[in-house]
């Protein structure tokens, strides 16, 4: 917390300028931004299309409360965003960030069932997951080390195993793959809660920061979605990290033909230029809410400048998205080749410009480093000294502590910059 309250010798460097995929600090040192902050910046730093749109919006209508006025900014952004979302008739609720989006989604799911005369107190989530820091979002987050101090507040969630090929939780299900086993366990978990007791299953379509870019097998999502649908359990796809082109398609759901009932969005939505999060739901979920029943809202929900920022980002992404998959392949190939023989690299995985390197103490047993080794701190520091920002996460998809080096650079990063990022990351590791 030292960097929040007072500057000290341990504070991170002070950023003074950022353009594209580059950041400069006050000493003039230049960094390649391999992580877009917390995997946020999609359209690159210094995008004047976005800053101009925000400035113009603030100059016309800076703020109105969503319960009293709508604005052209929100209306036109919501209509345009709906055209790229995986659900056909998406209804959109803008908020100020990912945790707010998750809180809103959970309440929306509960309120949907209540309106239909069903109580459904339980939500199912996955081990190792992260869905936000507020109380409701933390309640559905599966990392024990984040939950531990607050457990008395975090009831009402059951957890199933994450889709995690590197340390597959169901090795006995191979060689046919474990998607069927995941689906069977989800069905069991729902059924053991009792008929009509589970409101929603929340998961990232592709695992993000605390699980490390885990891409499930192709039949995982069709099977999981079927289990939910057959039991009236709403599927909440958390795309706060994977949305807006990060994985090479608009949304992680798009890789699997997944059509969730509710989606949560954030981070790349406004690329860091405004604190924007969004919830999208189907017309069915929306229309089931009786008028005035979904009592919810934040002071800054439906902020017009957030909508202007989001809309400007969406327009830019239309011209950027097509190149992301190939850039991701190039980065992944360079990382895999450079780290293939490294004794402490257990796995290199990812999709698009979301790539993860899982570090292990011993490659043959895949055992993690003991916490006191703090290898992640060393890697991120050595990389920073070499002018490269990587994103370190001490998560693991099985819920234990691990060491993940994540790369999630701006989607506008050039091929040459990606090659340098890969080389610097490999060198640091
Ligand atoms: N869900 C996911 C998948 C996330 O990655 C995050 C942030 N890392 C959140 C929710 C919470 O978003 P925020 O930090 O904007 O509240």
Image (tube, rainbow, N blue to C red):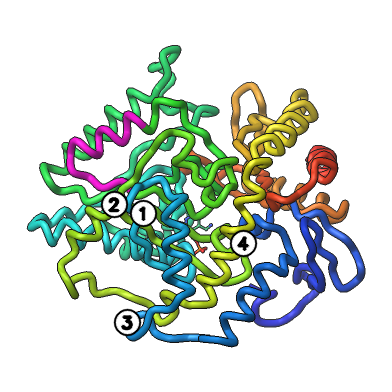
**Mark 4 lies on residue:** 271
Q: Which mark is residue 157?
A: 2
Tags 2 and 3 in contact by the CB under 8 Å rule?
A: no
* Disc nearer the start of the sequence (4/1): 1
In three-dimensional space, the C-alpha distance between marks 2 and 4, rounded to whole angstroms, equals 31 Å
Task: Tell me which label, 1 or 2, sits earlier in the chain.
Answer: 1
Q: Nearer the viewer, residue 198 or 78?
A: 78
Instruction: Look at the image and say whether residue 232 sits in the magenta stretch.
Output: yes
> Which percent across, then down, holds residue 167?
51, 28
CA neighbours of label 3 inside 10 A, class few (<14), some (14 to 19), many (20+): few
- Pair 4/1: label in front: 4
Q: Is mark 2 within 8 Å of ligand 1?
A: no
Q: Secondary structure at mark 4?
A: loop
In the depicted structure, whether residue 1 falls above or below residue 59: above
> Going by the picture, which residue comes out furthest to the top?
175
The residue located at (81%, 52%) in the rendering is 388
Q: Main secondary structure of the magenta part?
A: helix
The reply to whether dot 2 and dot 4 touch (C-beta < 8 Å) is: no
């Amino acid at each position: 917390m030292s960097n929040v309250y007072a500057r000290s010798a341990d504070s991170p460097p002070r950023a003074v300028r950022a353009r594209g995929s580059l950041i400069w600090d006050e000493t003039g040192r230049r960094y390649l931004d391999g992580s877009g902050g917390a995997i946020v910046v999609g359209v690159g730093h210094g995008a004047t299309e976005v800053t101009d749109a925000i400035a113009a919006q603030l100059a016309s209508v800076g703020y109105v409360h969503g319960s009293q006025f709508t604005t052209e900014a929100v209306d036109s952004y919501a209509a345009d965003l709906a055209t790229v979302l995986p659900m056909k008739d998406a209804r959109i609720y803008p908020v100020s960030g990912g945790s707010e989006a998750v809180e809103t989604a959970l309440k929306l799911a509960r309120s949907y069932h209540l309106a239909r005369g069903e109580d459904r107190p339980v939500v199912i989530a996955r081990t190792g997951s992260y869905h936000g820091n507020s109380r409701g979002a933390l309640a559905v987050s599966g990392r024990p080390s984040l939950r531990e101090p607050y457990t008395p507040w975090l009831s009402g969630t059951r957890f199933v195993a994450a889709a995690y090929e590197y340390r597959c939780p169901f090795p006995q299900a191979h060689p046919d793959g474990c998607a069927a086993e995941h689906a069977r366990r989800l069905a069991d978990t729902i059924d053991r809660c009792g008929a009509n007791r589970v409101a929603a299953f929340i998961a990232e379509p592709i695992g993000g920061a605390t699980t490390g870019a885990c891409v499930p097998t192709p039949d995982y999502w069709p099977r999981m979605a079927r289990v939910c649908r057959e039991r009236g359990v709403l599927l909440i796809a958390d795309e706060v990290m994977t949305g807006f082109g990060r994985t090479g398609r608009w949304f992680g759901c798009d890789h699997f033909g997944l059509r969730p009932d509710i989606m949560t969005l954030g981070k790349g939505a406004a690329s860091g230029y405004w604190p924007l999060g969004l919830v999208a739901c189907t017309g069915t979920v929306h229309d089931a809410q009786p008028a005035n029943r979904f009592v919810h809202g934040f002071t800054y929900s439906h902020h017009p400048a957030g909508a202007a920022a989001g809309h400007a980002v969406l327009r830019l992404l239309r011209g950027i998205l097509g190149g992301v998959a190939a850039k991701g392949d190039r980065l992944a190939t360079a990382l895999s080749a450079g780290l293939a023989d490294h004794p402490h690299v257990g796995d290199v995985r990812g999709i698009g410009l979301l790539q993860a390197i899982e570090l292990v103490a011993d490659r043959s047993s895949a055992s993690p480093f003991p916490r006191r080794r703090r290898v992640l701190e060393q890697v991120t520091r050595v990389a920073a000294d070499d002018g490269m920002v990587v994103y370190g996460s001490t998560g693991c998809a099985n819920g234990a502590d691990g060491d993940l080096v994540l790369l999630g650079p701006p989607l506008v990063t050039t091929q040459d910059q990606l090659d340098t990022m890969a080389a610097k990351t490999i060198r640091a590791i």
